[in-house]
Image (cartoon, rainbow, N blue to C red):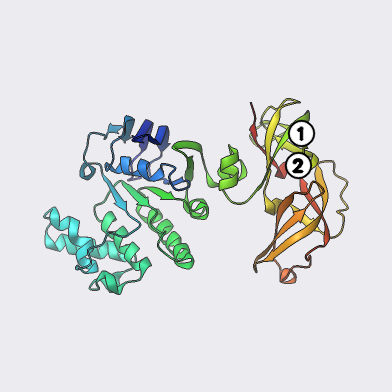
Amino acid sequence: MIGSDVVIGGISKSFGDFMALNNVSLEIKKGEFFSLLGPSGCGKTTLLRIIAGFENPDCGKLTLDGNNVLSMPPNKRHTNTVFQNYALFPHLTVFENVAFSPRLKKIPSAEIKDKVEKYLHLVRLEGHARKKPNQLSGGMKQRVAIARALINEPRVLLLDEPLSALDAKLRQHMLIELDRIHDEIGITFIYVTHDQQEALSVSDRLAVMNQGDILQIGTPHEIYESPATDFVARFIGETNLFDGTALSVEKMNIQDVEGVTEYMVELEIPELGKIKVTTVDEVHPGQLVSFTIRPEKIVISKEKPATKREDINLFQGTVDEPIYSGFQTKFYVEVPGKILLRVIKQHANYSDEGPDICWKDQVYLSWSAVDGYIVEVKK
């Protein structure tokens, strides 16, 4: 790998009375595509600017490949930043924009030409070298900005909401392009976004941030399937989230693939009643917990499921609102506790081209104990 390891240790940053970062620590591996994900004002851009050298922390340390870089100016850190507003020079051509930094370094013209052509080829803009920025689409402008950053051959590329100005279809295309570019050049990417789907789509790992804190670090699968807090569960995708009390805990006779003991927990949830959920965390009867079940994990049907398995949770309800969107239908189902459960039914087959469950239909909702998740054990 030609990227750099990035280690952030105990970094804090305040702007007046506002605490932007609160004792943040994380390690980003060499060559990793790592995302900082969170809502506006959570501190992710401030952290990126500290890595770039545009902001100084109040305290903490920052190392690249073991070297303390906090005292170094931005141009000495082997990092480059791609901004959401492109920051291209409007009076220069695509070629001149990409060549700007090498020319400042007085690199020979023939070498500059070769390098510019190399990076324009990488971002698939070979035929647009003589155009001005105002002749380009938003996606093309962003690719010019990426080429201009990469021509400096940084070991860490910092991307600050780079796709936020693009429409939805173009964002999806550019995500694929970013992933391809990362795979081809192999350097460390640190990507800032508030869009959960972007982060889940391209990241090797990601950190979920809120109010200056890192709440969870993990792979997209770990973050989605095993959220560490109520906030992470709500912020990543859609979910149904409840507080409940553990009634009983039973040690199961099987272990998961890593040899970890699992427990079957019966919960009392005021809005639902009794449910069963498996967990690898130790829970004691009487403890208050936070429970989540993703909408796509719930099976919805007009007929009562025939299964007699004891680990299946089963409820009846009334369809309050079906929302058909082509590839799926989202149902809001009112259960006896007068709450709405969100349920998503995917349309994977031709026979699923439309919803056969309609408004006000009586339906059954079911899910396995292994599909629910205990997010937090409350103190």
51 displayed left or right of 341? left
Identify the image quadrant of residue 354: bottom right
Q: In this figure, which residue is indicated by the disc labeled 1?
A: 264
Q: Relative to 90, say whether 295 is above or below.
A: above
The quarter holding residue 41 reads top left
Q: Residues within 10 Å of mark 1 (few under 14, many from 20)?
A: some
Q: Can you give x and y, in whole percent of width and height, for residue 90 in the image? A: 23, 67
Instruction: Kindly indicate whether the residue at mark 1 contacts the one at mark 2 (C-beta within 8 angstroms).
Output: yes
Residue position marked by numbered label 2 in the rendering: 369
- Horizontal relation, residue 30 to residue 106: left or right: right
Q: Amino acid at mark 2?
A: Ala
Front position in the image: 366 or 178: 366
Residue 135 place in picture, x, y as percent: 29, 74
- Residue at point 28% right, 55% down? 149
Residue density around tag 2, few if under 14, some if 14–19, many if 20 or more, within 10 Å: many
Q: Please identify the quarter of the rendering in which residue 146 is found.
A: bottom left
Q: Quadrant of the N terminus?
A: top left
Q: Secondary structure at mark 2?
A: helix
Establish if 319 lies above or below 69. Answer: below
Relative depth, front residue between 38 and 136: 38
Give the quadrant of the C terminus. Answer: top right
Q: Residue at x 13, y 55 (%)?
A: 104
User: Is 235 left or right of 282, judged from the image as shown?
Assistant: left
Q: How many marks?
A: 2
Q: Earlier in the sequence, mark 2 or mark 1?
A: 1
> Is residue 379 depicted above or below 205 in this figure?
above
Gap between marks 2 and 1 measured at Cα:
8 Å
For the point 70% across and 51% down, which residue is it? 297
Residue 254 visible in this rendered orientation of the protein: no
Q: Who's the residue at 22% across and 73% down the image?
A: 130
Q: Disc 1 marks which amino acid?
A: Met
Q: Is residue 148 visible?
A: yes
